[in-house]
Each structure stands twice: as C-alpha cells, then as structure tokens.
Image (spheres, helix red, strand yellow):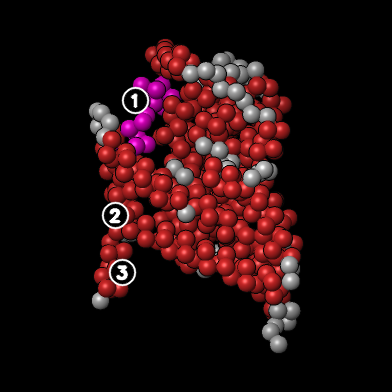
Amino acid sequence: MIESVRRRLAAILLHPASVFAGLLSGGLYGWLDAGPAPVVEFMGHLYLRLLQMCVIPLLFSAVVMGLAKLFSSGSARRYVGRLVGLFAAGLLLAGSLGLLLGEVGQPGANLQSGARQVIGEAVFRAEATSGATAGTSLQDIAIGIVPENIFKAFSSGNMLAILFFALLFGVALGSLDADKSERAILLFESIYETLTAIIGWLVYILPAGLFCLAYSQVSAVGLPILGAMFKLVLLIYAGGLAIVLLCILVVWWRLGGDVRRPVSALREATFVAFGASSSFAALPAALRGLKEGVGMDRHVVDLVLPLGITLNPPGSVFHFAIATVFLANLYGVVLDTGQMSFVLVASVLAGLAAAGAPGVAALSMMSLILIPLGLPVEVAIILLVAIDPIIDPVLTVVNVQANAATTILLAGSEDRGNRTQSDHGVLRQP
C-alpha cells in the first residue's frame, strides 16, 4: 500500500508538466516581482545545498569505483585515447561555434547610445565598489590541482584537486591484487548506492526546489543591463540550443535512430541543470538516467560522466569564445584569422582552467584570452557577471547534455566492440 502511494506521488511530482510548471512559474515570479523574497531565495539556496551535499562524495566514489574496476580487469587502455579525442573534439567544436556566432551576429557592434550608456554605468558602479580582479596563471592552476591536504580539498569543494586524488586512488586500487581490491571496490559501490538513494529522496521536492531556484536566478538580473546585452544573451541561447540539438543528433545516430529513450532518461537531469545552474547538482540524475533509462554500461557511465562534468565544459568554452568577440566589438577591435585561432585555443584552455571554479573565479580565467589581445579583463568580468544568472542555466544544460552524449558515444562503441569480440569467441564464458 505504502509503496503504491509512493509510486503515484513520484509519478505526479516527477511528471514533466509538474517540473516545468515549477521552473516556469518561479522564473515568471522572479521576473514580475518588484522586490526580493527572502523566504523563497532561502528555500532555493537550501535545496541547492541539499543536492550539492552528496555531489562530492558521489563524484569521488564513482570515479574511484570506475577506475578501479577498469584497471583490475585490464580494460582501461581501451578508453583513454577515445575519451581524450572525444573531449578535445567537443571543446574545439563548441569554441568554433562561439566564434562563428560572434562574427555573424556581432553582439557588441552598433549598439545604440542608450545601451552603451547602461553598460558604461554598470562598469562604473562595479569598479567603484570593488577592486580589480586579478587573472590566474596556468602555473597557479596546476599547483591548485595537486592538493597538499586532501581533507582540506574536500572541505573547500576544490573539484579539480578532489578529481586528481580520485584518479590516483582509483588507479592504485585497481592495481592491487584482486582479493585486496574487490572488498574496497564493494565498499565504494555501497557508498555510491547510498548517496544515490539520498538524492532520490530529494528529487520528490524537485518542482518546489526549481520554483525557488528559478526565482532567485531571474530576479538577480537587472532589466536595463539585460536589455543592453540582449543580443549577446540571445546568441548564447541560440548557440546553446544548437549544441544540445547536435548532441541529440549524435545520440540518435549512435543508438540507431532511437532518440526518445535518452531524451526521456535525461529529462530530470536537464531540468535540474537548468534550474540549479549546476552541472554537479545534475550529475546524480544524469548517472541514473544513462544507466537505468538508456541502459548504458554502468562501468563506463560511472567513470566517463563524472570525469566529463569536471573536465569537459563545452558550455564554458562556447561562452568564453563568443564573449571575447562581444568585447572586441565593444572596443572596436577587429580580430584577424590568427587572433581568431588564438581565441579558439585559449578558450579551450580557459574553459578547462575554469572547470569546477565558482562564479567570478571561473570568469576570471578569461584573462588567459583577453590579456594577450589587449582587452580589459575587469570590464569583461563585470559585464558577464551582470548577465550570468540568465545565461548560466543554458550553459549548464549544454555541459550536461554534451557529456551525456560523449558517454553514450564511448559506451556505445565499447558495447559494439564487446559484441564483436563475443562473436569471435573472445568473450565466451567457459
């Protein structure tokens, strides 16, 4: 009886209509509300913290478990080259699309005097209330990846340092004798399943949580600055939609024309990504969707998807590329072919450097692109922070969808390889 009630309640609360209604109504309330609603913002912040509470241990246990199983079975070598190739191709494609849309759309050129005045006032106010934002060198980033104290990295949420340690730990665990590693792998698998169960409970209040989060995101955007930078926002949404559609097309091709299953399976992850503007908050739903909804190999999913969410941010690369063109337009700088090539490569490096960094810290990585071009980093950060609440949701969806597609590509090729070997008797059990 209780189980039947639970299933009916889940069917209602997790129905796309309920989730979308919560997201849309929260955004509409934030758009129309003249003043802040502290209770709504508090509840949204609390729900996001509840989701993120389990993300770091979930990511750590998934990566360690996935790598340990791969290395203990001797199959890790099959993944590395294809994984790096897929990540690199996706990031370069996202950066190229950002440059293309920026050059075609010219988001910072021919702005009306009113729009330029609004942008100038926003820059002036921000510079008057805060100091200049220093850029981060590649040397600082490399040092920050290696944790001097792993427990400090866990407490501060340093995702790159945690991932680096998880990679070493997983490889070392998989290299031990089977009788020693199997018990530890089972422990990490139990931790992973426990965290997944906790997140499953939180999903029941997803519509209410998305209502509060959408309100907070939309109400934080000032209408004047949004109007002044509307063309850039529109191009970012158009580019994000194009990348998502490309991911769906790739999945359709890989699964032999079946696209409804993965779209339905990733529906919850997409809503969480858009409402929470956090790839890590959407990670548990994406993991569950790919394994249970699409039927992908759990070993591949548990390894590739957490790695991709942390190290493969096509949304950030696309954002940095088109934002650089916007700033060049704003200052009347015409980028030649060589400079465009530099922006493409630098956007990929900046996107990788920004992976796991929050807010302004991530945007400050644009210094890697802008300083060599002679463009002001502080102005870029000020303007992009102003519209960040409205563009971050679609960029987060891009990151989640792109990494899900990458995982399906790798898992699909692996399944096909296993079937081929099985046909030749290689995998036939004795």
Q: Give the distance between the C-alpha atoms of the residues marked 3 and 2, in whole angstroms.
A: 15 Å
Q: Helix, strand, or loop for circle 1? A: helix
Task: Determine which quarter of the picture holds residue 331.
Answer: top right
State the residue position of label 1.
223
Residue closest to the eye, 397 or 58: 58
Q: Looking at the picture, which amino acid does disc 3 mark?
A: Arg
Please state which amino acid type lies under the numbered disc 2.
Ser
Category of crowding for the residue at label 3, using alpha-carbon neighbours closer than 10 angstroms: few (below 14), some (14–19), many (at least 20): few
Q: Which residue is mark 2?
A: 18
User: Nearest the camera: 132 or 282?
Assistant: 132
Name of the residue lying farthest toward the bottom: 430
x and y, in percent, of residue 343 in the image: 65, 30
- At label 1, the amino acid type is Leu
Q: Position of residue 143 (x, y in %)?
A: 69, 37
Quadrant containing the N terminus is bottom left
- The quadrant of the picture occupied by the C terminus is bottom right
Label 2: state its secondary structure: helix
- Where does the image place residue 27, in percent across and percent down from the top left? 31, 39
Q: Earlier in the sequence, mark 2 or mark 1?
A: 2
The mark that comes first in sequence, 3 or 2, is 3
Q: Where does the image place residue 269, in percent across and percent down from the top left?
A: 44, 54
Rendering quarter of residue 115? top left
* Residue 152 visible in image: yes
How packed mark 2 is, by other alpha carbons closer than 10 Å (few <14, some 14-19, many 20 or more), is: some
With 8 as the anchor, is 372 left or right in this view?
right
Tell me the residue at 50%/49% (across/down).
280
Of the numbered discs 1 and 3, the one sitting upstream in the chain is: 3
Q: Is residue 96 visible?
A: no
The residue wearing badge 3 is 7
